Image (cartoon, rainbow, N blue to C red):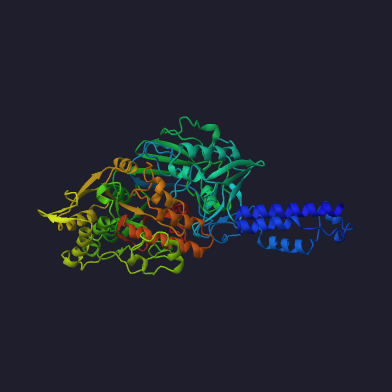
Amino acid sequence: MRQQHGRSNLAGLLHRCAVQIQRHGAFSGVAAMQLKTHAAGSCYDESRFDTADSTMGNRLAFIPSRAGAATLAFLLAFAPASAEPKHAIAMHGEPALPADFTHFPHVNAQAPKGGRINYAVVGTFDSVNPFIVQGSAARGLTDLAFGYNVYEPLMQRSASEPFTLYPLLAKSVDTDAARTYVEFTLDERAKFSDGKPVTPEDVIFTFELLRDHGLPRYGRSVKKIAKIEKTGERGVRCSFADGADRELPLILGLMPVLPKHAIDPATFEKSSLTAFPGSGPYTVGDVKAGESLTLRRNPDYWGKDLPSKAGVDNYDEIRITWYGNENSLFEGFKKGLVDVFIENDLGRWASGYDFPAVTNGDAAKDTFDNGLPSGMYGFVFNTRRPMFADRAVRSGLGDLIDFEWINRSLFASAYKRTGSYFDGSELSAAGRPASDAEQALLAPFPQAVAPEVLDGSWTPAKSDGTGRDRAFLKRGFDKLKSAGYRVENEKLVGPDGKPLAFDILLRGKDGEQVATAWKRTLALLGIEATLTTVDAAQYTQRLQTYDFDVIAFNYSSSLSPGAEQVGRWGSAFRDTPGTFNYAGVADPAIDAMIDKMLAATSRDDFVTAVRAFDRVLLSGAYAAPLYHQGEQWVGRWTRIGRPEGTPLNGYQLTTWWRAKP
């Protein structure tokens, strides 16, 4: 009878293990069913149980019979290891820093505290709620560049690694090998600026609030959660629905946490100039709608001694000023009203910094090398417009950007033509034939990638730089001709008999020189392009509603592209207002490649998927590539100090400090 009881225990154990392994994808469902069958025949050899071993307590020790032993060995070989909470989580591989790290490698842990930093941006704002669609939200509250100053995420990203998160509001994270769930344990010290503790209920409330009332990018992630629940006193566990990706635990780790006790969901979607409490190092001070925002250090900030906060949050006050255009902002920098100026204009970088402050050392030009991909700065076609529905039309128009003339005449030949969404990195498909693994991913979509992109021979059209290269013009014209266009009365006319004409929407003067040069080249073939310049507020509104033909836009990139690509290119967001799918893309091949990126478990598989994704984007000609700079440029008044060296992800403004009054 006792032997039968042992057999029953072992059979139950094996059955449960088989179910769990099947659920977590360790091997096929057929194999799992075989394990269940073997479990029924497993037996227990009670004679090997050592009752004299008092350390065993109530544990069951057993040695299975030969059939049971084989089954158990198989289970031990393939069963997923039980997960334990860890201090950090990496997208691929292991975190670089140990649990007892004292600070990030890219910071000056001894940076002085105090003083004020003056930032500036182009545009306007009418809200201090950065989580909703309505209104134009102020920068700096929860910001990749200026910092998570008021509203913090659960975990902190390290700029020295491709994609790794370390403790912030959450002191540990737990997930399994298949990443079917994630559990965050909150730091018991965490609290909001009004003194109320940050609780699991706040996390759950925030996720549900942003899912139902926040920006689409938040809802896109939270909707992948099948169940969210409180665990223990400070834990929050999210179990994922089918179709969730391996990046989701990290994406959720970057979600903000908002105070349940201070927010009414019924009014959350309405823009407001009154901020609710956050858990960050600063609180909102003076607010002048459309003009300026001042953040002040919270002397009771709970996280000031965290390793992830060493060497950051160095100012007592952060002031952000809004300017109408970039030229006026630069003038403010020259006068000392702005402490740092992020430079993207080569001409200005080459000749605009000869003012006295630079000459006498009060201001400086800083150049930063980094390991980031180029991203894609180009003219983006809104494929919702009938004229841009044909890929050949988009490709032909892109081939009529005379970069060589533009670069020589406008930029002293200093820029590099962009040939990939991930130029300059291992993620780029440019110049590389598709590997067997890439081709296997792309096989279900035989029309998605152009042959010249597949074999790595494609490059953007190149002219002789004279501005009168007839062979260059013919390449673009031939593609348009293949789409049914013809010259009639000195106009390029489509199959519908209408002249090819479109508008380029610009924010102020940004991109005007390049757009004018493109317009001139297009006119040589009878294509009419108009330029419409609007202020920052109108520009933002028109982008949110996709009310444009063409825009000049920069798709920034990272070494770990992931879920953000869904919002840029995913079919589900083609018609959702407020996303970054400006091109109006709805392509099953793109959706599939993003899924492969998000499901990759190794760096090699990830690189393969990103390169395949790059090939589909390039073949779709959704953006006509322009150019990029190989380094980052920042103008800085030397009263602001910064760490030596540059981390993998480029300069980090949040690590700078006030060095002089």
Q: Residue at x 25, y 56 (%)?
A: 393
Total numbered labels placed on residues in the image: 0
Answer whether residue 374 is visible to the viewer in this image: no
**Seen in the image, is 573 located left or right of residue 177?**
left
Judge by depth and name the residue closer to the eye, 419 or 149: 419
**Seen in the image, is 526 located left or right of residue 638?**
left
Q: Where residue 482 sits in the image (x, y, percent)?
A: 22, 59
- Farthest residue toward the right? 52
Q: Where residue 33 sits in the image (x, y, percent)?
A: 66, 55
Question: With respect to residue 610, does 324 lie above or below?
Answer: above
Question: With respect to residue 123, does 369 lie above or below?
Answer: below
Answer whether residue 221 is visible to the viewer in this image: yes
Q: Where residue 515 sits in the image (x, y, percent)?
A: 23, 54
Judge by depth and name the residue closer to the eye, 34 or 553: 34
Question: With respect to residue 317, does 59 lie above or below?
Answer: below
- Farthest residue toward the left? 489
Q: Residue at x 23, y 52 (%)?
A: 512
Judge by depth and name the residue closer to the eye, 581 or 91: 581
Q: Where residue 232 sits in the image (x, y, percent)?
A: 67, 42
Judge by depth and name the residue closer to the eye, 204 or 139: 204
